[in-house]
Image (cartoon, grey):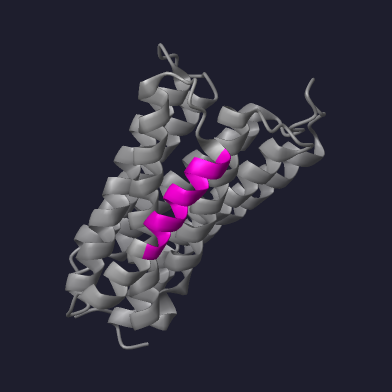
Amino acid sequence: MLTAMNTLTAGITGALGALAILGNILALLLGRPNATGTSRAIPWLQRSTSLMLALAAWGFALVGAAGTPLAPFSLAIAVGMSVSFIADLIMAEIIRVPNRVIGGIVVFAAAHLAYIAATLMLARALGRIPAPAMIACSAALVLGGAAYWRVAVDVPAAPAPLRWGSLGYLVALGVMTGLAWGMAITWPPLWPLAAGALLFFISDAILGNQIFRHNNWPSVGDVVWITYILGQAGIVWANAAALTLAAGG
């Protein structure tokens, strides 16, 4: 039988969440503007908060949802957040790959596939898949993302793998976000999942414009990170909303 999030789970995830918040605040307060003025955060401290969210996701999976019908959902979220942390290290060039942008696209796309699977698993655990809402929201986000890509990201002179990889990535991101919104429309307590997915979408939309169109307005890097990490936090803490909802709360 499902119960709302227990005290141990709340304690573990709450502590990690608090550390992530503190880490991001300190990264901004103690940092200095970089040479281009696009960011002031301390990179290693900022990236460490992604690890804290990954650990929180595993706390939900191994403690909160273990042995319940929500276990597959929680596990997929933990995998997605862990893969995202690896992608963060690639984008920060802490993990070296031949091309960090292509590497980031591929690894983040894998994270989105995990989140897509998690959303479908959650719908199944709650008793039904709200296909009409999911399809409608996904179609809207995919079309919107493709239009944005054409207007604000695409550079015809860029190498083909980068051009089409970025478009494919935005499509995957749009599907993930649309499915999350389809869930929240059907079950309003799941708003953290929808809000988190949308913030992730916004973050990567800004990042794509920065990387491909070189639109380096002041503090763009900090805006990208803040919207991204808040988005990831929403997705991770959708575990708490799901546990409460499934328990009849």
Residue at 48 percent across and 39 percent down: it is: 51
Q: Tell which of 148 and 118 is nearer to you.
A: 148
Q: Tell which of 183 and 79 is nearer to you.
A: 183
Residue at 37 percent across and 22 percent down: it is: 160
Give the farthest residue toward the front. 156
Q: Quadrant of the C terminus?
A: bottom left
Q: Is 63 on the left-hand or right-hand side of 127?
A: right
Examine the structure image and report whether residue 116 is included in the region drawn in magenta.
no
- Relative to 247, say whether 40 is above or below: above
- The residues colored magenta run 140-152
Total residue callouts: 0
Q: Is 174 on the left-hand or right-hand side of 232?
A: left
Examine the structure image and report whether residue 143 is included in the region drawn in magenta.
yes
Q: Main secondary structure of the magenta part?
A: helix
Does the image show residue 86? no
Q: Is 33 on the left-hand or right-hand side of 209?
A: right
Residue at 33 percent across and 63 percent down: it is: 139
Residue at 55 percent across and 24 percent down: it is: 92
Q: Is 37 on the left-hand or right-hand side of 73?
A: right
Q: Tell which of 228 and 59 is nearer to you.
A: 228
Residue 49, x across and y down, in percent: 56, 42
Give the farthest residue toward the top. 98
Residue 55, x across and y down, in percent: 42, 46
- Relative to 205, say whether 174 is above or below: below
Residue 136, x across and y down, in percent: 32, 71
- Relative to 186, say whether 218 is above or below: above
Does the image show residue 113? yes
Q: Quadrant of residue 166?
A: top left
Q: Quadrant of residue 197?
A: bottom left
Q: Quadrant of the N terminus?
A: bottom left
Residue 146, x across and y down, in percent: 42, 48
